[in-house]
Image (tube, grey):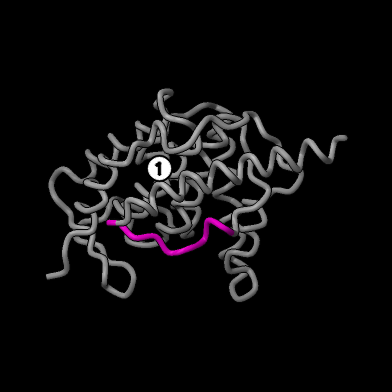
């Protein structure tokens, strides 16, 4: 049987020094271009306009939730995921999940959903820099793989939500769209560094545009 990639991620997650892998970043940051909105609009619109519309609806809902400072929970993610998938109900997966053509298996145990909820609460830990919290939450969704479908899209919305709670929006998200592996500790740290760079770059461009 394929090794449990979720167990590998939990090991990596506990060994990355999230508090020091990146420094603090500017906040709030108001992008002159809505990078996530552009990503949603392009997320299938050329071949499936309804998919792009659903992503935009989920983004709008997530931003409304952020304005109300709702904590990141599985219930909140399920609300967005109903919009992402265009389904009236979605529920936490009921078996092992697979990705990357079956090369990664995310096992299900009686404690998986509880552990996922605990990880989501970490996204509000003030001891960890914003970029690290956003990157870690993205990877939590990717590797806990909470729902049967659409987890990659949900991971991006989750990353953006953690930033949005601090008043930060990115003007580009393209560099984030690359394959991630559950057992790659260096890659996890690199994602946090990349989010930090994107926040600083957005802030720099906004500042320059105002001069």
Q: In the image shown, does 114 or 122 lie closer to the viewer?
A: 122
Can you give x and y, in whole percent of width and height, for residue 174 in the image?
60, 59
Q: Which residues are magenta?
A: 175-183
**Which residue extends farthest top?**
126
Can you give x and y, in whole percent of width and height, for residue 182 in the image?
30, 56
Tell me: residue 165, above or below residue 85: above
Q: In the image shown, does 183 or 37 lie closer to the viewer?
A: 183
Residue 140 colored in magenta in the image:
no
Write the residue at 40% across / 46% down.
189
Write the residue at 44% across / 51% down.
155
> Dot 1 corresponds to which residue?
137
Tell me: residue 116, above or below residue 147: above
Q: In the image shown, does 102 or 52 lie closer to the viewer?
A: 102
Q: Quadrant of residue 100?
A: bottom left
Write the residue at 27% across / 73% down.
102
Q: How many marks?
A: 1
Screen quadrant of the N terminus: bottom left
Write the residue at 45% across / 52% down.
154
Tell me: residue 199, above or below residue 126: below
Q: Quadrant of residue 151?
A: bottom left
**What secondary structure characterizes most of the magenta part?**
loop
Any part of residue 43 in sight: yes
Helix, strand or loop for disc 1: helix
**Which residue extends farthest right?**
211
């Amino acid at each position: 049987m394929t090794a449990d990639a979720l167990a590998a991620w939990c090991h990596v997650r506990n060994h990355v020094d999230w508090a020091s892998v990146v420094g603090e970043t500017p906040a709030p940051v108001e992008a002159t271009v809505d990078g996530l909105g552009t990503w949603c609009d392009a997320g299938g619109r050329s071949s499936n306009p309804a998919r792009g519309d659903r992503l935009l609806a989920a983004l709008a809902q997530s931003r409304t939730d952020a304005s109300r400072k709702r904590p990141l929970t599985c219930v909140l993610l399920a609300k967005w995921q109903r919009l992402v998938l265009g389904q009236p109900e979605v529920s936490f997966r009921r078996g092992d999940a697979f990705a990357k053509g079956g090369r990664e298996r995310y096992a299900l145990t009686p404690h998986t959903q509880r552990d996922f909820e605990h990880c989501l609460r970490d996204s509000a830990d003030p001891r960890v820099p914003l970029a690290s919290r956003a990157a870690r939450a993205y990877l939590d969704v990717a590797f806990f793989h909470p729902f049967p479908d659409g987890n990659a899209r949900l991971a991006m919305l989750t990353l953006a939500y953690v930033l949005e709670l601090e008043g930060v929006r990115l003007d580009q998200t393209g560099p984030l769209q690359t394959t991630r592996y559950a057992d790659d500790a260096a890659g996890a740290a690199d994602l946090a560094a990349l989010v930090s760079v994107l926040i600083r770059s957005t802030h720099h461009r906004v500042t320059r545009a105002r001069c």
